[in-house]
Image (tube, rainbow, N blue to C red):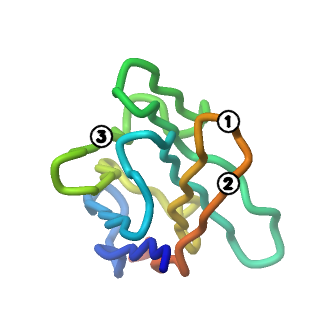
C-alpha cells in the first residue's frame, strides 16, 4: 500500500522557520520525483518545490526562492522542505507528491497545515 505521510507543520510567527518532512512507503522512492505543493483556502493547489530522483534537478516557485529549500534522503525514503523567513502568505496546507519517471503514477499525501501569523 502506497503511503506518503507529511509532518512538521504548525504555527509560526513571521520570520520564523519550519521544516516539513514526508516519508514514503509502498513504492520505489528513489525512482520518483518528489515535490511539495500547497493550497490556501479559496485558492488552487500549486507547486512550491520539486526535486528529481537523484537530487540533480531542483525547482522552486518564485515566491519561495531564497527562503525554502527542498532536499531528500533516499536511504530514509524522506523528502524535506526547510522553510525559512515564513510570511503570512505561506499559510496553507502543504502536500507531498510523488511522480514516477514515466509520469504514469502519481501519489499524494494527506497534507500538513502551516499557519503563519503574529
Q: What kind of element bears circle 3?
A: strand
Which is more toward the observer, 113 or 28? 28
Give x and y (percent) for residue 87. Answer: 46, 57
Q: Which mark is residue 75?
A: none
Query: Residue under circle 2?
Result: 105
Residue contact at pointers 3 and 2, CB within 8 angstroms: no
Which is more toward the observer, 56 or 84? 56
- Dot in front, 3 or 2: 2
Give x and y (percent) for residue 97. Answer: 56, 58
Residue contact at pointers 2 and 1, CB within 8 angstroms: yes
* Lower position in the chain sequence, tag 1 or tag 3: 3
Give x and y (percent) for residue 18. Answer: 27, 62
- Pick the quarter of the image with the C terminus: bottom left
Say whether residue 105 is left or right of residue 49.
right
Q: What kind of element bears circle 2?
A: loop
* Crowd around label 3: few <14 · some 14–19 · many ≥20 (10 Å): some
Give x and y (percent) for residue 40. Answer: 68, 71
Query: Residue under circle 1?
Result: 102
Say whether residue 34 is left or right of residue 69.
right
Q: CA distance from mark 3 to mark 2?
A: 21 Å
Vertical position of residue 97 compared to residue 58: above or below: below
Which is more toward the observer, 38 or 32? 32
Q: What kind of element bears circle 1?
A: loop
At x 38%, y 18%, the residue is 56
Q: Which mark is residue 71?
A: 3
Say whether residue 43 is left or right of residue 1.
right
At x 33%, y 52%, the residue is 79
Q: CA distance from mark 1 to mark 3?
A: 22 Å
Amino acid at each position: 500500500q502506497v503511503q506518503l505521510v507529511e509532518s512538521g507543520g504548525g504555527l509560526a510567527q513571521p520570520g520564523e522557520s519550519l521544516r516539513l518532512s514526508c516519508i514514503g512507503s509502498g513504492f520505489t522512492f528513489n525512482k520518483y520525483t518528489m515535490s511539495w505543493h500547497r493550497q490556501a483556502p479559496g485558492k488552487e493547489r500549486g507547486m512550491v518545490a520539486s526535486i528529481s530522483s537523484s537530487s540533480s534537478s531542483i525547482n522552486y516557485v518564485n515566491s519561495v526562492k531564497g527562503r525554502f529549500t527542498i532536499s531528500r534522503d533516499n536511504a530514509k525514503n524522506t523528502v524535506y522542505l526547510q522553510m525559512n523567513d515564513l510570511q503570512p502568505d505561506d499559510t496553507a496546507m502543504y502536500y507531498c507528491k510523488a511522480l514516477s519517471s514515466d509520469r504514469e503514477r502519481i501519489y499524494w499525501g494527506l497534507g500538513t497545515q502551516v499557519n503563519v501569523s503574529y
